Image: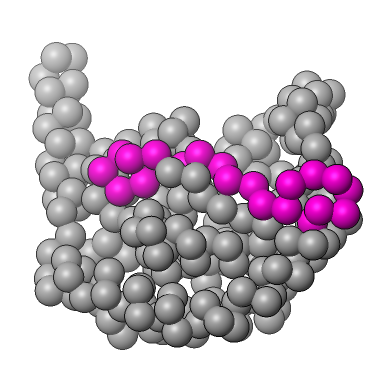
Amino acid sequence: MKSDKALNNAANFAASAFASNPTGVYATVFKRAFDIVLAIAILPVLIPVIAVLWVIATRDGGSGFFGHLRVGKDGVPFRCWKVRTMVMGAQARLEQHLKDDPEAAQEWAEDHKLTNDPRITTHGNFLRRTSLDELPQIINVLKGEMSFVGPRPIVEDELVRYGPYRAMYLSLRPGITGLWQVSGRNDISYDERVNLDLDYSRKIGFFLDCRLILATAGTVLKRSGK
């Protein structure tokens, strides 16, 4: 029994160490430069769009933006900005919904997402399906908290789901997009998402990032966000 536990611990340590430090000139130097150049280039186009979405989101009297606390590179917490797509008092509504609906509670426990989310506003469904609610994250990119491509930003409670690959997640800046978004983001399990993040950490490169960004544009047009 002790021997099996020791072997499992050793395997977990080895897997964690394997993915703890991205290597290569692009991953360690030029990826950040690419983020800054691309963000500055598209910012003039995005600012008017974000402004319009902000106005729409404030029509119910609430804030136009919502910053949710997420875990960033090296475990540093940051506020991941989005156009607000949820009603005021969303947390209380979620808790009551999960209490009243066991199937929804199970879905939430598995993926931290709901197919029919009672917190979403009328305009919120459109913004989420087009991923337009995520446009303010360009500010996170400019601040160095996120990258255009990387693992999906997660809350602290989700770190345990990465198991032996926790160090892999913490070694990277979370991404606005990534393999998870262009690989059936609504239809994959959490374990599959972790494997996609692990796969990306092993293959980080300029051309891969470019392909994923272009593929994301197609995903947005299909309105397959959630």
| Residue 186 belongs to magenta span | no
Could you tell whether 4 is left or right of 147 in the image? left
- Stretch in magenta: 57-77
Q: Which residue is drawn at 44% across and 33% down?
A: 156
**If the image is split into quadrants, where does the N terminus sit?**
top left
Q: Is residue 181 above or below residue 151?
A: below
| Residue 129 x, y percent position in the rendering | 72, 66
Q: Can residue 94 be seen in this view?
A: no
Residue 137 versus residue 2: which sits nearer the camera?
Answer: 137
Q: Residue 202 vs residue 53: left or right?
A: left
Tell me: residue 174, above or below residue 207. Answer: above
- The structure residue drawn at horizontal position 49% and vertical position 45%, both measured from the top left corner, is 79
Image coordinates for residue 185, horizontal then vertical, percent: 57, 61
- Residue 121 lies left or right of residue 33; in this view the side is right
Answer whether residue 123 is visible to the viewer in this image: yes
In the rendered image, the quadrant that contains the C terminus is: bottom right
Residue at figure coordinates x 88%, y 48% from the top left:
60
Residue at the image position 12 percent from the left and 32 percent from the top = 10
> How many marks are shown on the rendered structure?
0
